[in-house]
Image (spheres, grey):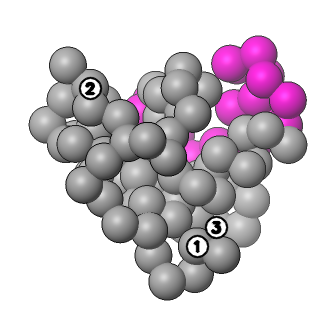
Amino acid sequence: MRKPGSWMQNPTDERILEVLDTGLMLGPTTIAKNIDKHRVTVSDRLRELRNYGLVECPEEGYYEITDIGEQYLVGELDASELEPTEDSQ
């Protein structure tokens, strides 16, 4: 069972992580199209997920899931215990 943090917006955040769990690096527009959300919404959520270490941006405009993100999806991680990074502002 997944344990979301109070900072998460579900089901949007979980859908983003699930799409990225395919192993592909994807941009916000592609993710938005696949989860039926607006690109701006997805961009905002990606920024927040990155601040908490669930996704990373290895190349400008592209995101991929981290090991922490994968642990969250399989229920091994309680996202409420994560702290945002320094640049989360």
Position of the C terminus, as image quadrant, is: bottom right
53 or 33, which lies in front?
A: 53
Residue 18 forms part of the magenta stretch: no
- What residue does disc 1 label? 88
Identity of the amino acid at label 1? Answer: Ser
Which region shows up in magenta? 20-39
* Quadrant of residue 81 within the rendered picture: bottom left
Q: Position of residue 62 (x, y in %)?
A: 66, 55
- Mark 2 lies on a secondary structure that is loop
Position of the N terminus, as image quadrant, is: top left
Residue 26 forms part of the magenta stretch: yes
- Mark 3 lies on a secondary structure that is strand
Please state the total of marks drawn on the protein image. Answer: 3
Identity of the amino acid at label 3? Answer: Glu
Q: Position of residue 52 (x, y in %)?
A: 43, 60
Q: Is residue 19 shown to the viewer in this render?
A: no
Residue at left offset 57%, top offset 33%: 9
Identity of the amino acid at label 2? Answer: Arg
- What residue does disc 3 label? 59
Q: Position of residue 70 (x, y in %)?
A: 29, 40
